[in-house]
Protein backbone atom coordinates (compact mmCIF):
# COMPACT_ATOMS: atom_id res chain seq x y z
CA UNK A 1 0.00 0.00 0.00
CA UNK A 2 2.71 2.41 1.04
CA UNK A 3 4.64 1.79 -2.16
CA UNK A 4 1.51 2.39 -4.16
CA UNK A 5 0.90 5.74 -2.48
CA UNK A 6 4.47 6.86 -3.02
CA UNK A 7 4.36 5.92 -6.70
CA UNK A 8 1.08 7.74 -7.17
CA UNK A 9 2.40 10.84 -5.44
CA UNK A 10 5.54 10.77 -7.56
CA UNK A 11 3.40 10.66 -10.66
CA UNK A 12 1.66 13.78 -9.43
CA UNK A 13 -1.62 12.02 -8.89
CA UNK A 14 -2.07 12.80 -5.23
CA UNK A 15 -1.96 16.15 -3.55
CA UNK A 16 -0.12 16.53 -0.27
CA UNK A 17 -3.31 16.33 1.74
CA UNK A 18 -4.05 12.89 0.35
CA UNK A 19 -6.99 14.10 -1.75
CA UNK A 20 -6.92 13.64 -5.50
CA UNK A 21 -4.80 16.29 -7.04
CA UNK A 22 -5.88 18.41 -9.94
CA UNK A 23 -4.26 18.17 -13.32
CA UNK A 24 -3.62 20.27 -16.39
CA UNK A 25 -3.10 19.00 -19.90
CA UNK A 26 -0.77 21.22 -21.88
CA UNK A 27 -0.19 21.13 -25.64
CA UNK A 28 3.14 22.61 -26.79
CA UNK A 29 6.03 22.19 -29.24
CA UNK A 30 8.89 22.53 -26.79
CA UNK A 31 10.71 19.31 -27.58
CA UNK A 32 14.38 20.35 -27.95
CA UNK A 33 16.82 20.02 -25.04
CA UNK A 34 16.71 23.70 -24.10
CA UNK A 35 12.96 23.93 -24.54
CA UNK A 36 12.31 20.85 -22.42
CA UNK A 37 14.54 22.25 -19.67
CA UNK A 38 12.54 25.49 -19.65
CA UNK A 39 9.23 23.65 -19.64
CA UNK A 40 10.52 21.63 -16.67
CA UNK A 41 10.57 24.85 -14.62
CA UNK A 42 6.83 25.29 -15.19
CA UNK A 43 6.01 21.62 -14.63
CA UNK A 44 7.81 21.60 -11.29
CA UNK A 45 6.11 24.80 -10.20
CA UNK A 46 2.68 23.24 -10.82
CA UNK A 47 3.54 19.91 -9.24
CA UNK A 48 4.62 21.73 -6.08
CA UNK A 49 1.07 23.05 -5.89
CA UNK A 50 -0.35 19.54 -6.23
CA UNK A 51 -1.31 19.99 -9.87
CA UNK A 52 -0.32 17.05 -12.08
CA UNK A 53 1.09 17.80 -15.53
CA UNK A 54 -0.23 15.88 -18.52
CA UNK A 55 2.19 16.56 -21.31
CA UNK A 56 1.05 16.80 -24.92
CA UNK A 57 4.15 17.60 -27.00
CA UNK A 58 3.79 18.02 -30.78
CA UNK A 59 7.19 18.84 -32.31
CA UNK A 60 7.67 21.49 -34.98
CA UNK A 61 8.84 25.11 -34.68
CA UNK A 62 6.28 27.81 -35.30
CA UNK A 63 3.65 25.41 -33.98
CA UNK A 64 2.00 24.38 -37.26
CA UNK A 65 1.82 20.69 -36.33
CA UNK A 66 0.64 21.58 -32.84
CA UNK A 67 -2.20 23.66 -34.29
CA UNK A 68 -3.28 20.70 -36.45
CA UNK A 69 -3.44 18.40 -33.40
CA UNK A 70 -5.34 21.06 -31.53
CA UNK A 71 -7.96 21.33 -34.24
CA UNK A 72 -8.73 17.61 -33.89
CA UNK A 73 -9.07 17.89 -30.10
CA UNK A 74 -11.39 20.89 -30.27
CA UNK A 75 -13.51 19.23 -32.94
CA UNK A 76 -13.86 16.23 -30.64
CA UNK A 77 -15.03 18.67 -27.93
CA UNK A 78 -12.12 17.64 -25.73
CA UNK A 79 -9.65 20.56 -25.71
CA UNK A 80 -6.50 20.49 -23.58
CA UNK A 81 -6.42 22.82 -20.56
CA UNK A 82 -3.89 25.16 -22.16
CA UNK A 83 -2.07 25.44 -25.46
CA UNK A 84 1.19 27.18 -26.34
CA UNK A 85 0.18 29.62 -29.02
CA UNK A 86 1.42 32.53 -31.10
CA UNK A 87 -0.17 35.89 -31.91
CA UNK A 88 -2.91 35.71 -34.52
CA UNK A 89 -3.67 32.05 -33.76
CA UNK A 90 -4.83 33.09 -30.28
CA UNK A 91 -7.19 35.63 -31.77
CA UNK A 92 -8.51 33.07 -34.26
CA UNK A 93 -9.44 30.63 -31.49
CA UNK A 94 -10.96 33.43 -29.44
CA UNK A 95 -13.17 34.45 -32.35
CA UNK A 96 -14.43 30.88 -32.49
CA UNK A 97 -15.43 31.13 -28.84
CA UNK A 98 -13.10 28.29 -27.80
CA UNK A 99 -11.19 30.18 -25.11
CA UNK A 100 -11.96 30.81 -21.45
CA UNK A 101 -12.04 33.99 -19.40
CA UNK A 102 -9.10 35.02 -17.23
CA UNK A 103 -10.38 38.48 -16.35
CA UNK A 104 -10.96 37.83 -12.65
CA UNK A 105 -7.41 36.55 -12.18
CA UNK A 106 -5.94 39.27 -14.40
CA UNK A 107 -7.70 41.97 -12.36
CA UNK A 108 -6.61 40.44 -9.06
CA UNK A 109 -2.99 40.23 -10.21
CA UNK A 110 -2.88 43.51 -12.17
CA UNK A 111 -1.86 42.06 -15.55
CA UNK A 112 -3.13 45.16 -17.37
CA UNK A 113 -0.42 47.26 -15.77
CA UNK A 114 2.53 44.89 -16.20
CA UNK A 115 2.10 43.23 -19.60
CA UNK A 116 3.27 45.40 -22.54
CA UNK A 117 0.49 46.62 -24.84
CA UNK A 118 2.08 44.86 -27.84
CA UNK A 119 1.44 41.53 -26.09
CA UNK A 120 -1.97 42.44 -24.71
CA UNK A 121 -3.10 42.96 -28.29
CA UNK A 122 -2.89 39.17 -28.61
CA UNK A 123 -3.71 38.05 -25.04
CA UNK A 124 -7.06 39.83 -24.94
CA UNK A 125 -10.12 39.56 -27.10
CA UNK A 126 -13.08 41.95 -26.76
CA UNK A 127 -11.64 43.15 -23.46
CA UNK A 128 -11.28 39.64 -22.07
CA UNK A 129 -7.97 38.02 -21.10
CA UNK A 130 -7.84 34.65 -22.86
CA UNK A 131 -4.15 33.79 -22.70
CA UNK A 132 -1.22 34.13 -20.32
CA UNK A 133 2.02 35.33 -21.98
CA UNK A 134 5.07 33.48 -20.71
CA UNK A 135 7.81 35.26 -22.64
CA UNK A 136 8.96 37.52 -25.42
CA UNK A 137 11.27 36.07 -28.06
CA UNK A 138 12.71 37.87 -31.03
CA UNK A 139 13.77 36.55 -34.38
CA UNK A 140 16.43 39.01 -35.60
CA UNK A 141 19.37 37.38 -33.83
CA UNK A 142 22.59 35.74 -34.97
CA UNK A 143 24.38 33.08 -32.89
CA UNK A 144 28.07 32.53 -33.53
CA UNK A 145 30.83 30.21 -32.36
CA UNK A 146 33.62 32.42 -31.06
CA UNK A 147 36.44 29.98 -31.67
CA UNK A 148 35.34 29.27 -35.25
CA UNK A 149 35.21 32.99 -35.94
CA UNK A 150 38.67 33.50 -34.47
CA UNK A 151 40.10 30.67 -36.60
CA UNK A 152 38.53 32.28 -39.67
CA UNK A 153 39.97 35.70 -38.81
CA UNK A 154 36.61 37.27 -37.96
CA UNK A 155 37.34 39.39 -34.93
CA UNK A 156 34.09 41.20 -34.24
CA UNK A 157 30.37 40.83 -34.80
CA UNK A 158 29.70 42.25 -38.28
CA UNK A 159 28.01 45.65 -38.11
CA UNK A 160 26.26 45.69 -41.47
CA UNK A 161 25.14 43.38 -44.23
CA UNK A 162 28.32 43.59 -46.34
CA UNK A 163 30.49 42.88 -43.32
CA UNK A 164 28.25 39.90 -42.53
CA UNK A 165 28.67 38.46 -46.03
CA UNK A 166 32.41 39.04 -45.77
CA UNK A 167 32.48 37.17 -42.42
CA UNK A 168 30.42 34.28 -43.88
CA UNK A 169 32.91 34.10 -46.73
CA UNK A 170 35.88 33.93 -44.38
CA UNK A 171 34.30 31.20 -42.25
CA UNK A 172 33.49 29.16 -45.34
CA UNK A 173 37.03 29.55 -46.71
CA UNK A 174 38.42 28.43 -43.35
CA UNK A 175 36.69 25.08 -43.91
CA UNK A 176 33.62 25.43 -41.70
CA UNK A 177 29.95 25.49 -42.57
CA UNK A 178 29.39 29.24 -42.65
CA UNK A 179 25.65 29.27 -41.96
CA UNK A 180 24.02 26.48 -39.95
CA UNK A 181 20.48 26.16 -41.22
CA UNK A 182 17.60 23.73 -41.23
CA UNK A 183 15.62 23.70 -44.47
CA UNK A 184 12.09 24.00 -43.14
CA UNK A 185 9.71 26.72 -44.28
CA UNK A 186 9.37 28.31 -40.84
CA UNK A 187 13.15 28.50 -40.42
CA UNK A 188 13.56 30.22 -43.78
CA UNK A 189 10.78 32.61 -42.80
CA UNK A 190 12.59 33.31 -39.53
CA UNK A 191 15.68 34.39 -41.46
CA UNK A 192 13.45 36.42 -43.77
CA UNK A 193 12.12 38.53 -40.83
CA UNK A 194 15.66 39.76 -40.16
CA UNK A 195 16.61 40.14 -43.80
CA UNK A 196 13.57 42.31 -44.59
CA UNK A 197 14.29 44.50 -41.56
CA UNK A 198 17.95 44.81 -42.53
CA UNK A 199 17.08 45.66 -46.12
CA UNK A 200 14.12 47.99 -45.78
CA UNK A 201 14.02 49.05 -42.13
CA UNK A 202 11.09 49.11 -39.73
CA UNK A 203 8.65 51.20 -41.78
CA UNK A 204 9.13 49.04 -44.84
CA UNK A 205 8.75 45.85 -42.81
CA UNK A 206 5.49 47.16 -41.37
CA UNK A 207 4.09 48.23 -44.70
CA UNK A 208 5.01 44.99 -46.46
CA UNK A 209 4.67 42.24 -43.87
CA UNK A 210 2.11 43.66 -41.44
CA UNK A 211 -0.11 45.85 -43.61
CA UNK A 212 0.34 43.73 -46.76
CA UNK A 213 0.82 46.88 -48.82
CA UNK A 214 1.09 45.69 -52.41
CA UNK A 215 3.46 48.40 -53.58
CA UNK A 216 5.90 47.45 -50.82
CA UNK A 217 5.54 43.71 -51.33
CA UNK A 218 6.21 44.19 -55.02
CA UNK A 219 8.99 46.75 -54.61
CA UNK A 220 12.68 46.78 -55.53
CA UNK A 221 13.44 46.77 -51.82
CA UNK A 222 11.59 43.46 -51.46
CA UNK A 223 13.51 42.13 -54.45
CA UNK A 224 16.76 43.13 -52.75
CA UNK A 225 15.65 41.24 -49.65
CA UNK A 226 15.12 38.12 -51.75
CA UNK A 227 18.53 38.65 -53.40
CA UNK A 228 20.03 38.61 -49.92
CA UNK A 229 18.20 35.37 -49.11
CA UNK A 230 19.81 33.90 -52.23
CA UNK A 231 23.15 35.21 -51.03
CA UNK A 232 22.71 33.40 -47.69
CA UNK A 233 21.72 30.21 -49.50
CA UNK A 234 25.34 29.91 -50.72
CA UNK A 235 26.61 29.53 -47.20
CA UNK A 236 24.52 26.57 -45.98
CA UNK A 237 25.84 22.99 -46.18
CA UNK A 238 24.54 20.38 -48.60
CA UNK A 239 22.61 18.47 -45.90
CA UNK A 240 20.48 21.40 -44.77
CA UNK A 241 17.15 20.09 -46.07
CA UNK A 242 14.61 19.45 -43.36
CA UNK A 243 17.15 19.64 -40.54
CA UNK A 244 15.58 20.62 -37.20
CA UNK A 245 16.57 24.05 -35.92
CA UNK A 246 18.18 22.69 -32.75
CA UNK A 247 20.46 20.46 -34.82
CA UNK A 248 21.56 23.56 -36.70
CA UNK A 249 22.25 25.23 -33.32
CA UNK A 250 24.26 22.14 -32.36
CA UNK A 251 26.50 22.67 -35.40
CA UNK A 252 27.44 26.09 -34.05
CA UNK A 253 27.73 24.81 -30.48
CA UNK A 254 30.06 21.98 -31.57
CA UNK A 255 32.28 24.21 -33.70
CA UNK A 256 31.21 22.77 -37.03
CA UNK A 257 29.58 25.99 -38.19
CA UNK A 258 30.16 29.70 -37.70
CA UNK A 259 26.73 31.31 -37.58
CA UNK A 260 23.03 30.59 -37.19
CA UNK A 261 20.29 33.15 -37.78
CA UNK A 262 17.54 32.14 -35.37
CA UNK A 263 15.25 33.44 -32.66
CA UNK A 264 16.63 33.54 -29.12
CA UNK A 265 15.21 30.10 -28.31
CA UNK A 266 18.58 29.06 -29.85
CA UNK A 267 20.25 30.46 -26.75
CA UNK A 268 18.40 27.84 -24.74
CA UNK A 269 20.39 25.20 -26.64
CA UNK A 270 23.72 26.91 -25.92
CA UNK A 271 22.88 27.24 -22.24
CA UNK A 272 21.67 23.64 -22.08
CA UNK A 273 25.06 22.61 -23.55
CA UNK A 274 26.77 24.61 -20.78
CA UNK A 275 28.14 27.25 -23.15
CA UNK A 276 28.65 30.81 -21.95
CA UNK A 277 27.82 33.97 -23.90
CA UNK A 278 30.82 36.16 -24.69
CA UNK A 279 33.18 33.29 -23.97
CA UNK A 280 31.96 30.40 -26.15
CA UNK A 281 29.38 32.09 -28.29
CA UNK A 282 28.29 35.52 -29.45
CA UNK A 283 24.78 36.86 -29.80
CA UNK A 284 24.14 39.89 -31.93
CA UNK A 285 21.32 41.38 -33.97
CA UNK A 286 21.10 40.49 -37.67
CA UNK A 287 23.56 43.02 -39.11
CA UNK A 288 21.64 46.09 -40.20
CA UNK A 289 18.82 45.56 -37.68
CA UNK A 290 20.49 47.04 -34.62
CA UNK A 291 17.86 48.96 -32.63
CA UNK A 292 15.01 46.97 -34.20
CA UNK A 293 13.20 44.00 -32.69
CA UNK A 294 10.91 41.53 -34.49
CA UNK A 295 9.17 39.86 -31.58
CA UNK A 296 6.97 36.90 -30.87
CA UNK A 297 5.49 35.87 -27.59
CA UNK A 298 4.60 32.37 -26.47
CA UNK A 299 1.29 32.55 -24.71
CA UNK A 300 -0.74 29.83 -23.10
CA UNK A 301 -4.22 30.11 -24.51
CA UNK A 302 -6.70 28.82 -21.95
CA UNK A 303 -9.47 26.69 -23.42
CA UNK A 304 -13.06 26.39 -22.28
CA UNK A 305 -12.85 23.48 -19.91
CA UNK A 306 -15.55 22.22 -17.55
CA UNK A 307 -15.98 23.73 -14.08
CA UNK A 308 -14.08 20.84 -12.49
CA UNK A 309 -10.90 21.68 -14.43
CA UNK A 310 -11.06 25.45 -14.01
CA UNK A 311 -9.32 25.76 -10.69
CA UNK A 312 -6.20 23.98 -11.98
CA UNK A 313 -6.32 26.12 -15.12
CA UNK A 314 -6.32 29.29 -13.02
CA UNK A 315 -3.39 27.94 -10.98
CA UNK A 316 -1.50 27.35 -14.22
CA UNK A 317 -2.23 30.88 -15.48
CA UNK A 318 -1.24 32.40 -12.17
CA UNK A 319 2.01 30.39 -12.07
CA UNK A 320 2.89 31.57 -15.59
CA UNK A 321 2.35 35.22 -14.66
CA UNK A 322 4.35 35.08 -11.45
CA UNK A 323 7.31 37.52 -11.74
CA UNK A 324 9.90 35.22 -10.17
CA UNK A 325 8.71 32.33 -12.32
CA UNK A 326 9.05 34.56 -15.41
CA UNK A 327 12.65 35.26 -14.46
CA UNK A 328 13.55 31.61 -13.75
CA UNK A 329 11.81 30.31 -16.87
CA UNK A 330 13.13 32.86 -19.35
CA UNK A 331 16.72 32.55 -18.13
CA UNK A 332 16.55 28.92 -19.31
CA UNK A 333 14.37 29.46 -22.39
CA UNK A 334 16.49 32.20 -23.99
CA UNK A 335 13.57 34.61 -24.10
CA UNK A 336 12.81 37.63 -21.90
CA UNK A 337 9.90 38.18 -19.51
CA UNK A 338 6.44 39.11 -20.73
CA UNK A 339 6.14 41.57 -17.85
CA UNK A 340 7.85 44.93 -17.53
CA UNK A 341 8.50 44.59 -13.78
CA UNK A 342 10.92 41.64 -13.79
CA UNK A 343 14.53 42.60 -12.95
CA UNK A 344 17.28 41.52 -15.38
CA UNK A 345 19.57 40.45 -12.53
CA UNK A 346 19.41 36.70 -13.16
CA UNK A 347 19.92 37.02 -16.93
CA UNK A 348 23.18 36.55 -18.85
CA UNK A 349 24.51 39.24 -21.19
CA UNK A 350 22.41 38.12 -24.17
CA UNK A 351 19.30 38.12 -21.97
CA UNK A 352 20.11 41.55 -20.57
CA UNK A 353 20.61 42.85 -24.10
CA UNK A 354 17.33 41.24 -25.13
CA UNK A 355 15.46 43.02 -22.34
CA UNK A 356 17.10 46.35 -23.06
CA UNK A 357 16.56 46.08 -26.84
CA UNK A 358 12.89 45.23 -26.30
CA UNK A 359 12.25 48.15 -23.96
CA UNK A 360 14.05 50.59 -26.27
CA UNK A 361 12.37 49.33 -29.43
CA UNK A 362 9.02 49.62 -27.67
CA UNK A 363 9.59 53.31 -26.82
CA UNK A 364 11.20 54.21 -30.14
CA UNK A 365 8.51 52.52 -32.25
CA UNK A 366 10.96 50.01 -33.75
CA UNK A 367 9.22 46.95 -32.34
CA UNK A 368 7.47 44.84 -34.98
CA UNK A 369 5.64 41.53 -34.84
CA UNK A 370 7.49 38.57 -36.32
CA UNK A 371 5.89 37.47 -39.58
CA UNK A 372 7.52 34.05 -39.30
CA UNK A 373 6.08 33.46 -35.84
CA UNK A 374 2.52 34.58 -36.27
CA UNK A 375 2.68 38.15 -35.02
CA UNK A 376 2.34 40.10 -38.27
CA UNK A 377 -0.44 38.47 -40.30
CA UNK A 378 -2.98 35.67 -39.74
CA UNK A 379 -1.98 32.06 -40.45
CA UNK A 380 -3.54 31.96 -43.93
CA UNK A 381 -1.37 34.82 -45.22
CA UNK A 382 1.65 33.70 -43.20
CA UNK A 383 1.52 30.26 -44.79
CA UNK A 384 1.22 31.78 -48.25
CA UNK A 385 4.31 33.93 -47.53
CA UNK A 386 6.12 30.84 -46.21
CA UNK A 387 5.54 29.04 -49.53
CA UNK A 388 7.08 31.83 -51.55
CA UNK A 389 10.07 32.29 -49.26
CA UNK A 390 10.88 28.60 -49.13
CA UNK A 391 10.44 28.02 -52.87
CA UNK A 392 12.75 30.92 -53.58
CA UNK A 393 15.31 29.73 -51.03
CA UNK A 394 15.31 26.33 -52.70
CA UNK A 395 15.96 27.87 -56.10
CA UNK A 396 12.50 27.16 -57.52
CA UNK A 397 11.91 30.83 -58.39
CA UNK A 398 14.11 33.88 -58.81
CA UNK A 399 13.80 37.09 -56.82
CA UNK A 400 11.67 38.87 -59.43
CA UNK A 401 9.17 35.99 -59.46
CA UNK A 402 9.21 35.81 -55.65
CA UNK A 403 8.27 39.46 -55.34
CA UNK A 404 5.28 38.94 -57.65
CA UNK A 405 4.29 35.84 -55.72
CA UNK A 406 4.40 37.79 -52.43
CA UNK A 407 1.87 40.27 -53.83
CA UNK A 408 -0.41 37.37 -54.78
CA UNK A 409 0.12 35.67 -51.43
CA UNK A 410 -1.15 38.79 -49.68
CA UNK A 411 -4.43 38.52 -51.55
C1 LIG B 1 8.41 29.55 -30.30
C2 LIG B 1 9.57 29.22 -29.39
C3 LIG B 1 10.16 27.87 -29.81
C4 LIG B 1 10.52 27.89 -31.27
C5 LIG B 1 11.15 26.63 -31.79
C6 LIG B 1 8.80 29.42 -31.75
O1 LIG B 1 7.68 29.59 -32.57
O2 LIG B 1 7.95 30.85 -30.06
O3 LIG B 1 9.18 29.15 -28.06
O4 LIG B 1 11.26 27.59 -28.99
O5 LIG B 1 9.35 28.13 -32.03
O6 LIG B 1 10.44 25.51 -31.45
Image (cartoon, rainbow, N blue to C red):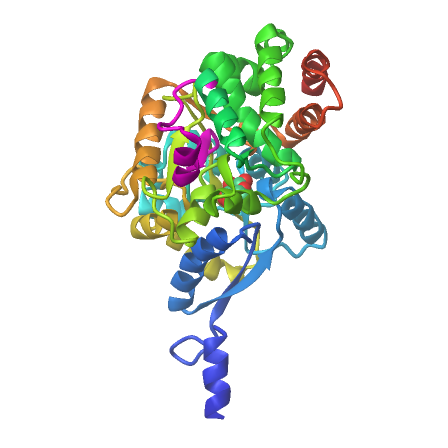
Q: Give the vertical position of 395 relative to 307 (above or below).
A: above
Quarter of the rendering containing residue 336: top left
Left or right: where does residue 206 sit relative to residue 134? right
Q: Nearer the viewer, residue 105 or 315?
A: 315
Magenta run includes residue 118:
no
Magenta-colored span: 138-161
Q: Is residue 60 above or below residue 170?
A: below
Relative to 131, 62 lies left or right: right
The residue positioned 59% from the left and 43% from the top of the image is 61
Task: Say whether residue 29 is left or right of residue 77.
Answer: left
Residue sitting at x 35%, y 48%: 331
Q: Identify the residue at horizontal 57%, vertical 50% (top origin).
A: 29
The outermost residue toward the right is 396
Is 155 included in the stretch rendered in magenta?
A: yes
As rendered, which of 188 and 122 lies closer to the eye? 188
Rendering coords of residue 271 (x, y %): 39, 50
Location of the C terminus (image quadrant): top right
Amino acid sequence: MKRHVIAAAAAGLLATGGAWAQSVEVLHWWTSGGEAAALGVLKKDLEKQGVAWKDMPVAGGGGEAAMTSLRARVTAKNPPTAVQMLGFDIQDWAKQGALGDLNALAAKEGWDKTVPAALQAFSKHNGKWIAAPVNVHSTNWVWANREVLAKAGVNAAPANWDAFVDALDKVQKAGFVALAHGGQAWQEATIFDGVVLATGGVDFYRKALVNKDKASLGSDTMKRAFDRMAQLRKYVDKDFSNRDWNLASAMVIQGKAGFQIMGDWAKGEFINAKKAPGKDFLCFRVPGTQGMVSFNSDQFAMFNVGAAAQDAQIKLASAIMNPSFQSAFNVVKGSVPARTDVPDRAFDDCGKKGMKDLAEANTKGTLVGSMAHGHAVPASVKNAFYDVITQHFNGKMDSAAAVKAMVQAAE
